[in-house]
Each structure stands twice: as structure tokens, then as C-alpha cells.
């Protein structure tokens, strides 16, 4: 029988103003996303991924230690626990990107992965942190990821995560493929402007080079008071041939679903033998620099 997995990508606008109390900001976005997760379940989704730092605005638009207060432990914090309940209720794998506090002063941009029975499978910590354009001050808030490029075995396929700015670096995308990923999710916070033309260029290229499905998610709206640009949505699903098979709107909240035929990965790899023809012993500069 074909291995068909229905995925859901959730893109959403922020709810509370950035000067609200942190607990109100977080709770409003959690409540909003629980409803959107319910909608995804009603549409038959088996795997659902939320956007980067889903429970608030994209606060790295400024450098303010107030936002450290949004960080919490993974998996022992309240948000992961709540999402475990949601995953169990809906029988759905959830990818939950939040602000992680490993211990005091050790903070990461992290995605927790929870299986359809509510079991915590592990986490991915964002490796590449932008700190070069006004409004993207991530090194003020996060340490670079240090857990490698894990792939999580689920009932609905082998899942990898590669977060936002990571997508500009093909090395990690290849690591995920070598580690067995069939579906890679890229939860993001990306604004119109400098890199927008890359949104539908780089990730289909990763899908082709590594012959897996890739699912980028982008938040929506303009977030005052920073107004660093429009988070333009346009979350999409790309197949292993680099074809976009489903796409969300530019300017509104949306639950995007798509059916992935995981057997297509093997079909593509029989034609394009990129893994067979790799020459890792010749790529010395990659590991030297």
C-alpha cells in the first residue's frame, strides 16, 4: 500500500501587542494555535508543524532582556506538556517551536517533536543564527544549536527540522537527508524584502538535492512596534522533485494541508542517484574551514 502522510502547516498573526504582559502574549497565541491545531485535525492531518517561536511575536526584532522571560524548559515546561495533551487528543504528531531554557543563561531557539500518542521524541536546536540585518538580533537571545541534525521516527514518516535561517546553509539540509529524513519542516519568521526571492528557490533546491519532502512555514502580518517588514506567509509543501504541491496565502492565518506519498522518495532516488554518486572524501574544504 502507498505510504500517504497528510501534513498541516500553520501560519498565523500575533495576537497581543508586544508591550502586553508576557503571560498574556504567550497564552493568547497558545489558545489561538490550539484552535488551529484542532482545525488541522478536522482536516485529517497526521503531522502538524507550527511557525518559529510560535507563542509570541518575533521578538528578536529588538535586543531587550525582557523577552528572556518567554523561555521555558523542554520537555518539562508547560507548553510542551500542553502540546503533548493536544497531540494525544488528536492522534497527531506535533512539531512545536518555542524558546528553550536549558538552564539559567543557556537559551536556544528549539523545536520539540511529539508523537501521536503524546510522547516527547526529542528536539532540534537551530544551528545558524542571524545577527547581521536590522531586526534580526538572534545571537542576543540564543546559543547556536548543539544537538546535531536529528531525525525522528514516527508512525507517519521520518521527520527532520531545519529552522528559518538554517535554510540558507545546504550542509545541514544534506545531513538531514543522510540521517534518513523523509519530511523536513522549516518553521520560519521571514519578512518581505532582501531574501523573499529565495523563499521558493533554496528549499525546493534542498528537496531536489536531498530527495525528500520539505515544508517551510512562515508567520503572517506586520508586528509593531518594530515594523521590520511584512511576515508574508506563503507556507508551502515541496515534493522530492522540487515541485510545490500546496501553498498558503500571503496575508492571512491559514492551516495548509497536503498529502505526501512517501514512496515517491524511493522512486526519485532510483532515477537521480545523488547519494550513490556523492564524493565525501573529496570535500576537504568543507570540513577544514
Image: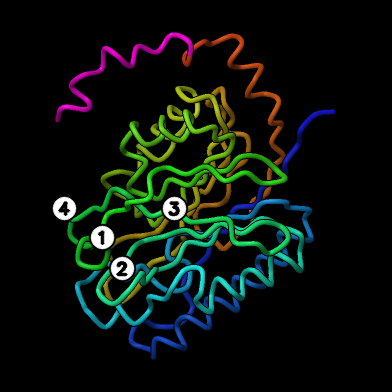
The N terminus sits in image quarter: top right
Rendered image quadrant of residue 162: top left
Q: Nearer the viewer, residue 133 or 173?
A: 173
Q: Earlier in the sequence, mark 4 or mark 3?
A: 3
- Whether the residues at callouts 3 and 2 have beta carbons within 8 Å, the answer is no
Q: Is residue 9 above or below residue 142?
A: above
Cα separation, mark 2 vs mark 1, equals: 6 Å
- The residue that appears at 77% across and 55% down in the rendered structure is 43
Cα separation, mark 1 vs mark 4, equals: 16 Å
Queried whether the magenta region covers residue 74, the answer comes back as no
Name, please, the residue furthest toward the right.
1
Q: Which residues are magenta?
A: 276-289
How packed is label 4: few (under 14 Cα within 10 Å), some, or many (20 or more)?
Answer: few
Q: Secondary structure at mark 3?
A: strand
- The residue that appears at 44% across and 30% down in the rendered structure is 206
Q: Earlier in the sequence, mark 2 or mark 4?
A: 2
The residue under label 3 is 124
Rendered image quadrant of residue 137: bottom left
Q: Which mark is residue 132?
A: 4
Cα separation, mark 2 vs mark 4, equals: 20 Å
Cα separation, mark 3 vs mark 2, equals: 13 Å
The residue under label 1 is 143
Q: Nearer the observer, disc 1 or disc 4?
A: 1
- Whether the residues at callouts 2 and 1 have beta carbons within 8 Å, the answer is yes
Cα separation, mark 4 vs mark 3, equals: 23 Å
Q: Is residue 158 above or below residue 217?
A: above
Amino acid at each position: 500500500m502507498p505510504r500517504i502522510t497528510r501534513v498541516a502547516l500553520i501560519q498565523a498573526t500575533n495576537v497581543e501587542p508586544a508591550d502586553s504582559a508576557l503571560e498574556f502574549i504567550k497564552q493568547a497565541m497558545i489558545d489561538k494555535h490550539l484552535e488551529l491545531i484542532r482545525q488541522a485535525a478536522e482536516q485529517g492531518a497526521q503531522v502538524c508543524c507550527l511557525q518559529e517561536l510560535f507563542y509570541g511575536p518575533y521578538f528578536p526584532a529588538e535586543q531587550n532582556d525582557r523577552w528572556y522571560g518567554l523561555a521555558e524548559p523542554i520537555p518539562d515546561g508547560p507548553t510542551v506538556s500542553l502540546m503533548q495533551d493536544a497531540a494525544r487528543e488528536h492522534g497527531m504528531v506535533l512539531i512545536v517551536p518555542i524558546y528553550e531554557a536549558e538552564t539559567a543563561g543557556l537559551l536556544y531557539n528549539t523545536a520539540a517533536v511529539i508523537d501521536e500518542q503524546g510522547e516527547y521524541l526529542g528536539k532540534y536546536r537551530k544551528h545558524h543564527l542571524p545577527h547581521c540585518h536590522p531586526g534580526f538580533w538572534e545571537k542576543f537571545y540564543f546559543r547556536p544549536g548543539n544537538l546535531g541534525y536529528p531525525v525522528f521516527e514516527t508512525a507517519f514518516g521520518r521527520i527532520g527540522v531545519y529552522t528559518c535561517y538554517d535554510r540558507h546553509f545546504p550542509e545541514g539540509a544534506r545531513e538531514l537527508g543522510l540521517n534518513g529524513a523523509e519530511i523536513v519542516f522549516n518553521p520560519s519568521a521571514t519578512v518581505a524584502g532582501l531574501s523573499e526571492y529565495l523563499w521558493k528557490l533554496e528549499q525546493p533546491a534542498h528537496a531536489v538535492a536531498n530527495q525528500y519532502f520539505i515544508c517551510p512555514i512562515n508567520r503572517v502580518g506586520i508586528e509593531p512596534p518594530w515594523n521590520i517588514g511584512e511576515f508574508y506567509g506563503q507556507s508551502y509543501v515541496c515534493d522530492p522533485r522540487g515541485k510545490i504541491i500546496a501553498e498558503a496565502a500571503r496575508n492571512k492565518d491559514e492551516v495548509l494541508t497536503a498529502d505526501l506519498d512517501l514512496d515517491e522518495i524511493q522512486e526519485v532516488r532510483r532515477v537521480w542517484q545523488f547519494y550513490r554518486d556523492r564524493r565525501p572524501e573529496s570535500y576537504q574544504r568543507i570540513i577544514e574551514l
